[in-house]
Amino acid sequence: MARWQVLTLLGGVAISVAAWAQHAAHQPATAPAAAAAVAVVHPLGDSKVRGLVRFSQTGQQVRIVAQIEGLAPGGKHAIHIHEYGDCSSPDGMSAGGHYNPENHPHGLPDQEPRHAGDFGNLQANDKGIARLELAVNNLSIAGHHNPIIGRAVIIHAKPDDGGQPVGNAGGRIACGVIGLAKAQ
């Protein structure tokens, strides 16, 4: 390579580094942590189950508020986070298994340790509507500790009995992908 070609190449690299440094100087040191997420839950198969699950994070705690309708009146149904944000199959199996990044045994919300995605059960009223409010500290919305963005919320046909390996909760009747939301 000729000397003028080497100098041209080095000059181009120097300009690129200077431009990158100027750009980096105007960026925040770290991206702000995501404080809110939402999953819009849609029916699977012949189900009529639908609703909304909201997540909000303050410090190490994530608050979950679910409002689900179309359930069997008075029925109890398991609710979990699953590995993949893929609700494309009619049976919901495309969402994979329970979200369990730390390889813990399955458990209900009052048991430690448990899967990061184990939220227990929804209890429907006589109109088939359930509301769940829960606070957990074993996951994060988009942080380093068991992030949930891009995963799926699954509503199951049966209650979660806490049994191994996944609570004997039956088929999947509704699914929603967890995405970033505007903090409220």
Image: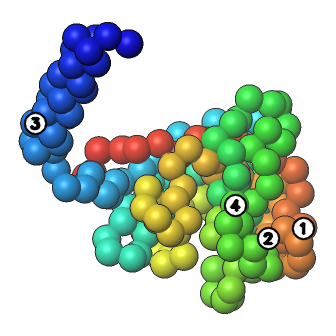
The image quarter in which residue 170 lies:
bottom right
Q: Which amino acid does label 2 sit on?
A: Asp
Question: What's the CA distance linking mark 3 and mark 4?
Answer: 41 Å
Sequence order check: which comes first, mark 1 or mark 3?
3
Is 33 on the left-hand or right-hand side of 37?
Answer: left
What label does residue 22 carry, if any? 3
Left or right: where 35 falls relative to 109: left
Q: What element carries label 2?
A: loop
| Mark 3 → mark 2, Cα distance in angstroms | 54 Å
Kind of element beneath mark 3? helix
Residue 125 visible in the shown view: yes
| Front position among marks 4 and 2 | 4
Q: Describe residue 33's horizontal placement relative to residue 143 as left or right.
A: left
> Does the residue at mark 2 contact the one at mark 1 (Cβ under 8 Å)?
yes
Earlier sequence position, callout 3 versus callout 2: 3
- Percent of width and height locating residue 10: 24, 24
**Vertical relation: 176 (above or below) 59:** above
